[in-house]
Image (tube, rainbow, N blue to C red):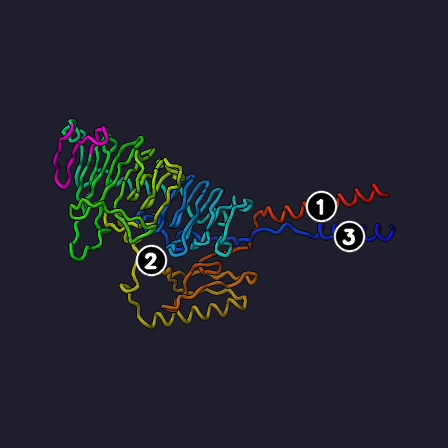
Amino acid sequence: MKTKKLLVTCLLLVMIICTGTCTVEALEYQESETTFIDEGGNYSLYYILNHFNHFVRTDVDAGHTIGAVAVGGKANYDRGNGKQEYKQTTSSYMKGTITKIVSDGYFKNLYVGEINKTNTFYHQNEAHTFISKNDCYLDFDQAFDSIKKEANSFIGAGDYKITLDDLDHVSNTNTTFEGEHWSLARINECEKSKVILTVDAQYSYEFEDGVLNSIDRVITNYTANKETMDDISHQEVMLISNDRGSIKIPYVRTLINGNEKVIENTSEWGDGTSFVYMLPNATEVTTNISQQHIGHIVAPNAYLHEMNGNVNGCFVVNKLQILTNVNGGASESHMFPYHGQRIKNDTSKPEDDTHRKRDPKENDKLNKESTSNDSQENNDLKTKSTIQENTSTNNEIILNKEELKTNTSHTLNTPIDSSNNEVVVENKKQTNVKQKDSVKTGDDTHLFMYVLLELLAFVGIVSLRKKA
């Protein structure tokens, strides 16, 4: 009996020691001082609509989203982010509390706000996830000030203006009013009176206040060579409204050469689309019908919700809620970047390698400096260098001179693009990531194990005392 008691006591002592030395392990992320600008970004609408599915000032509640996202408030991506076959063209940033992001392993990089140091969220991409030190990655105030100014510059700049007087011409059923490159018609459909706007592609259309809300459907006529069916993604349509309240955007139908066959791309990503709603002062944007939405929405002051269908385009809004549609399913955000010419910023236009030629000596010099810097980094030396970066998806080449801050406790993880032997910056140890110490976030599983050990030790001690 004494031997048994002694054995139990020894086991309890071992358990107590293990419990005392057990640390609550946590998910470990590196801190980074890298900014959106460091990675080649800028706050122009051209850049944003080419790289982000969602660019949102405050909260997001969304379904599956293919492209990169920038979220200034709380983020809940209930059905996941990205897809293995699609390569995102820029890093993502979630500044506020992350509720859920599910499959996040497809982010190029994910920067999260400091509030997430103590926040546990499901993740798959620890190696490419960074805590943005002092939330420095992206300045949403500066970004949206710039976006609002640019969006308002389109007011009064439309090619054609559609007024309330024009709408009065179709106040009766089965009437049509013709404008230049556009027409209005009123029809009866499903026992309801509906206004149909038909427009030619390659033009912008501005609406007097109240007109856009009165239009139920927009039919866009694209032109293409019948034999080759030329790409129509560059043929731009912009719908501009200065309405300051709530706007219900119409159903969009696209035709080619007047063909009655509806052209709707059901892919999750594609070469692009240049259909844009420019709504700089709207405070709320919804749609009144379940549809596959086509087009980008630029409404920096608006709460966008009730899309009621999948989306082919990008959103630049104040708040976003497109998690569910009227049938209870989740709306998906598909990545079709902007390919038009009206929204233009020379500094943000993606530059193709084939259009930028360097002196071969310059390339040799850059390659030598890159090799030299790798050697110095392994020896814990600090140096200054010029690194040639290739972002690989938008082929934009950026030359940065950064002071390398070496931390031998972290592993070098810089993949090489074998097609051109240039360094692709996608990871922990990129030269323009000004990294600090790693930080740890909470891990409920390890905490549970710790509490369980403590509980078992306590029960054992009580049991021994009773027997004594």
In what element is the residue under mark 2?
loop
Q: Give the percent coordinates (x, y) of residue 391.
A: 37, 59
Question: In 3D space, how far apart are the residues under numbered discs 3 and 1 (Cα atoms)?
Answer: 13 Å
Question: In 3D space, how far apart are the residues under numbered discs 1 and 2 (Cα atoms)?
Answer: 54 Å
The residue located at (30%, 40%) in the rendering is: 291
Q: Which residue is mark 3?
A: 11
Depth order, front residue of 297/255: 255
The residue located at (54%, 47%) in the rendering is: 117
Can the viewer see residue 202?
no
Q: Quadrant of the C terminus?
A: top right
Q: Report whether 135 appears left or right of 464.
A: left
Number of the front mark, 2 or 3: 3
**Dot 3 alpha-carbon crowd within 10 angstroms: few under 14, some 14 to 19, many 20 or more:** some
109 in magenta: no
The residue located at (46%, 57%) in the rendering is: 433
Q: Which residue is mark 2?
A: 394
Task: State yes or no: discs 2 and 3 in contact (Cβ < 8 Å).
Answer: no
Depth order, front residue of 402/166: 166
Q: Which residue is mark 1?
A: 454
Magenta span: 173-195
